């Protein structure tokens, strides 16, 4: 029996390079099937620092939230390009309703706020989005990683080890 799980990455141009690369590489290293979901399929998406780019495997129109064990949302300017898309919001709502792990770092929680799933939840993210989180009904805290039921959130690239560790803990599969 395989322990492989499908992990979705919601991604648009301008993502924070390390916040995509490090979780992606770690999911693959742990034997998971990492699927990049963009606004369109087959689009080259570039990191804001220009150190890395990825091709989207699926468009959000083709993606079904319940196909995934976890959804990871890297930061940078990518979340700002995803958060107003109705299909992205619906995907996130469906994932949350199904109890699927939603891991968002830096500006990633903007997508969770836009999807309307933060009421009564505690989370963190880039300090500049604290008001957005509060307006969406969430409680914003300044911590390295916050786990609230199926939500995992972190603030910045320096928090990636804790962020990735908490996500892997939720998936329950380790390469080592």
Image (spheres, rainbow, N blue to C red):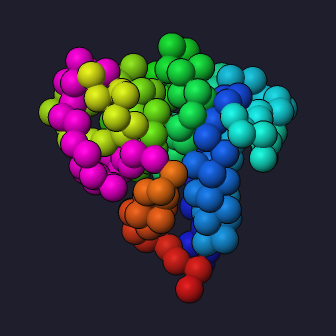
Residue closer to the observer: 103 or 77: 77
For residue 159, above or below residue 140: below
Point out residue 84 in the picture as x, y percentages from the top left corner: 51, 13
Toward the left, the furthest residue is 120
Q: Residue at x 21, y 30 (%)?
A: 138
State left or right for residue 140 relative to residue 54: left
Q: Residue at x 61, y 65 (%)?
A: 26
The magenta span reads: 132-156
Residue 84: in magenta span? no
Q: Residue at x 59, y 80 (%)?
A: 175
The quarter of the picture where the C terminus appears is bottom right
Residue 142: in magenta span? yes
Residue closer to the observer: 75 or 93: 75
State left or right for residue 131 relative to residue 95: left
Q: Residue at x 52, y 77 (%)?
A: 174
Point out residue 23 in the picture as x, y percentages from the top left corner: 58, 57
Q: Is residue 67 visible?
A: no
Point out residue 10 in the picture as x, y percentages from the top left corner: 59, 36
Point out residue 115 in the picture as x, y percentages from the top left corner: 39, 22
């Amino acid at each position: 029996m395989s322990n492989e799980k499908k992990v979705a990455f919601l991604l648009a141009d301008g993502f924070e390079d390390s916040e995509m690369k490090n979780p992606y590489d770690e999911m693959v290293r742990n034997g998971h099937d990492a699927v990049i979901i963009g606004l369109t399929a087959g689009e080259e998406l570039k990191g804001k620092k220009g150190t890395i780019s990825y091709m989207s495997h699926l468009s959000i129109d083709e993606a079904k939230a319940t196909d995934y064990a976890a959804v990871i949302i890297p930061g940078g300017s990518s979340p700002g390009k995803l958060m107003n898309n109705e299909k992205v919001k619906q995907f996130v709502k469906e994932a949350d309703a199904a109890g699927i792990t939603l891991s968002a770092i830096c500006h990633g929680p903007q997508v969770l706020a836009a999807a309307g799933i933060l009421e009564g939840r505690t989370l963190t993210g880039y300090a500049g989005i604290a008001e957005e989180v509060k307006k969406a009904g969430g409680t914003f805290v300044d911590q390295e990683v916050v786990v609230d039921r199926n939500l995992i959130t972190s603030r910045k690239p320096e928090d990636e080890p804790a962020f990735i560790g908490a996500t892997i803990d939720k998936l329950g599969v380790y390469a080592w």
